[in-house]
């Protein structure tokens, strides 16, 4: 059983991560901007917190084994993704001793993954400009994480495939590191439920510390 602080529990992906974590018997604290908007999940604690404030992050992260960030910019400025990851690292880094700090697992983006032709997905034709901006913000957040030594924070970034949406929990998925996972029909996708399975497997196995990896059906 792990103690998990989860940011983004009200979101599409975060809600599945919350459900999967509770189903495995982990102790989850949803850290949200507005507790009134957090879905009622028996077994989860809900606290108010600000992912953009390192002092608030330190308070939420203290005593946890893992901090998960599934936040997204919605229709707001995608740069919040970079501010958030810096705040998360900054807040966790204030906890002492370093060995007691929780791990950090972030939900990343697919834009910087290599498509089958070898180019980053954000260069693919037809990617809307607004989505491209979010993809670049996720890449900037990952670039920052890559500067963080594991001795300071044991971090991992899990990039979704090109498409992720609510669906069936099959419990199966395929893994890759920096290459987009594509099926035999050329589709790169996963249900948000199976993405949550992969993220919780990473929490349980700690197999990708200090790097980004990705999943697909
Ligand atoms: N193919 C891909 O690469 C791909 C596809 C889908 C999603 N994603 C990424 O996955 C992440 C989650 O996506 P999603 O669809 O689950 O997003 P979502 O449904 O829009 O949910 C976003 C979550 O972020 C929280 N949030 C936003 N700003 C926040 C802030 N300043 N402080 C604290 N919480 C904040 C929201 O909380 P409130 O309830 O307080 O607003 C909400 O829980 C995003 O970063 C998104 O870009 C990637």
Image (cartoon, grey):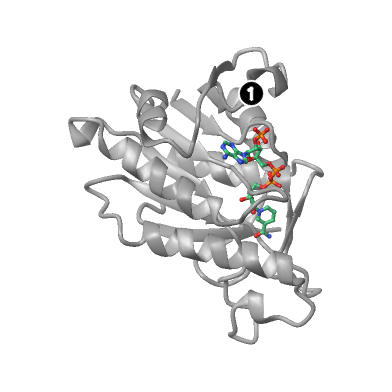
Question: What residue is pinned by disc 1?
Answer: 34
In the displayed structure, does residue 39 sit left or right of residue 103?
A: right
Please provide percent x and percent y for residue 146. Answer: 36, 61
With 180 as the anchor, is 217 left or right in this view? right
Q: Secondary structure at mark 1?
A: loop
Q: Answer whether residue 110 is visible to the viewer in this image.
A: no
Which residue is at the far left?
Answer: 97
The image position of residue 21, as x and y in percent, is: 58, 29
Does residue 121 appear left or right of residue 143 in this picture?
Answer: right
Say which residue appears at 44% left-offset and 48% top-offset. Answer: 85
Q: Residues within 10 Å of mark 1 (few under 14, many from 20)?
A: few
**Where does the N terminus fall, quadrant-wise?**
top left
Q: Is residue 18 above or below residue 44?
A: below
Instruction: Please state the total of marks drawn on the protein image.
Output: 1
Task: Indicate the quadrant containing the C terminus: top left, top right, bottom left or bottom right.
Answer: bottom right
Height in image: 121 above or below 171?
Answer: below
Determine which quarter of the picture holds residue 102.
Answer: top left
Q: Is residue 126 left or right of residue 203?
A: right
Residue at 47 percent across and 58 percent down: it is 141
**Ligand 1 image-quadrant field:** top right
Q: Residue at x 64, y 37 (%)?
A: 14
Above or below residue 89? Residue 65 is above
To which quarter of the image does residue 33 belong?
top right
Q: Which residue in the rendered view is the most extreme toward the bottom?
A: 117
Whether residue 112 is visible, yes or no, is: yes
Between 44 and 86, which is closer to the camera in this rendering?
86
Q: Residue drawn 30% across and 55% down? A: 148
Q: Residue furthest front?
A: 77
Q: Position of residue 69 (x, y in %)?
A: 52, 41
**Residue 68 drawn at (x, y percent):** 50, 38
Q: Is mark 1 within 8 Å of ligand 1?
A: yes
């Amino acid at each position: 059983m792990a103690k998990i602080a989860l940011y983004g529990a009200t979101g599409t992906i975060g809600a599945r991560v919350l459900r999967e974590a509770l189903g495995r018997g982990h102790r989850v604290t949803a850290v949200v901007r507005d507790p009134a908007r957090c879905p009622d999940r028996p077994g989860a604690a809900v606290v108010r917190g600000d992912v953009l404030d390192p002092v608030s992050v330190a308070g939420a992260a203290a005593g946890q084994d893992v901090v998960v960030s599934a936040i997204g910019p919605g229709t707001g400025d995608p740069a919040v993704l970079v501010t958030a990851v810096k705040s998360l690292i900054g807040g966790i880094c204030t906890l002492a001793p370093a060995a007691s700090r929780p791990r950090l697992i972030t939900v990343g983006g697919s834009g910087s993954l290599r498509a089958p032709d070898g180019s980053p997905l954000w260069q693919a034709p037809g990617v809307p400009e607004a989505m491209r901006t979010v993809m670049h913000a996720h890449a900037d957040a990952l670039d920052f994480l890559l500067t963080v030594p594991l001795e300071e924070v044991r971090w991992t970034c899990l990039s979704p495939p090109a498409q992720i949406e609510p669906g069936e929990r099959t419990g199966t998925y395929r893994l890759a590191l920096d290459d987009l996972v594509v099926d035999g029909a050329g589709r790169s996708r996963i249900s948000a439920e199976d993405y949550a399975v992969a993220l919780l497997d990473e929490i349980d196995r700690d197999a990708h510390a200090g790097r980004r990896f990705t999943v697909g059906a």
